[in-house]
Structure formats: structure tokens, C-alpha cells
Amino acid sequence: MRIILNLIDYYIYDMSKSAGWECNAEGRFAGCDDSREYWQTHHPETQPSARWPEGRRGHPFIVRSPSGVAGFALIREMGDDPDVDYDMAEFFIVGKYQRRGIGRHVACAIFDMFRGRWSVRQLVANIPAKEFWKAVVSDYTKGHFTESCGTCDGWDMVYLTFDNT
């Protein structure tokens, strides 16, 4: 968990280039508010405020390279959504490892691991992410996906959806 929490500031910084986000008064970029939920369970001793909503679950992944940590992925299992089984909630590859095929390889491995209806969303303003995900999803699905626009928490988003069952 600590590795992903450490990388989140870099992830948010990377996205700030497109979104125009600023660092806080302490000089840090705020992390993902729900990142800790990926390690929570529905165990009876877990505080209700720390639990995922019924039917949902998180799957955290650390991306490693032979020389170190290369990024992370946070997957949401959407048990309560009738249209989506899995959401690529957060995905980050450290700059040194970008454009080397690592992100594509990791994304496809995760898609293969979780079969069902997927949603992969990107900020409309994040052109590199939109280009990356459209290429990956298009290749993975052989063009069988849907692209739509919407909002999430007040942000304009592009949604790529597909079914790999």
C-alpha cells in the first residue's frame, strides 16, 4: 500500500499538466481520496466508514520493472452497477517507463485477469491518456468498444466501454 500511496502524488502531478490542478499549501498534490479503500475488506471488524459499498471491491496492483517500481493500477469491481463490472479507476506508469509498451502490457494483462464489462475513463483535457487508452482498448477489443462522453465528479470525461467475457 505504501508504494502506491507514494506514487499517487506523481500520478496527480502528471494529470495536473492537463487538468490545471495546483499543489496544496504544503507543496504537495493531493492524492486520490479513495485510494485507501483498495485495501479495505468487508470483514466485520472493519469500520463501516472504511468499507466499500456492498457489492463493490478494489484491486490494487503495483507495476514493477527489473530495476524498480514502474507504476500502479487501481481496479474497481462494480458489483452494484448493472452496466459495468470493472472500472479502470486509476492507472499510472512512471515517466521513465512510458512509451515502452509497459502500460499497454499491464493494461491488457489486467483486462485478461478480470472478464466482464469494462469502463475506462479519461479526463477530456488529458490528451496523452485519451490517445493511450483509445489505442490500447481498440487493439485489445479489435475495435469492438463504445466511446462516449460524460462527467464524473464535475469533470468532463471520455468513457471507453467494452465486454471481454
Image (cartoon, rainbow, N blue to C red):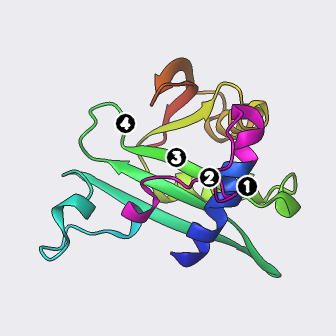
Range shown magenta: 14-37
Circles 3 and 2: CB atoms closer than 8 Å: yes
Percent across and percent down for residue 101 are 82, 55
Marks 2, 1: nearer the viewer: 2
* Magenta run includes residue 29: yes
* Magenta run includes residue 151: no
Q: Secondary structure at mark 4?
A: loop
For disc 3, the marked residue is 88
Would residue 135 appear left or right of 148 to someone viewing this image? right
Q: Which mark is residue 165?
A: none
Residue at 64 percent of width and 59 percent of height: 26
Q: Secondary structure at mark 2?
A: strand
Q: Amino acid at mark 1?
A: Gly
Q: Amino acid at mark 2?
A: Phe
Percent across and percent down for residue 23 are 68, 49
For disc 4, the marked residue is 84
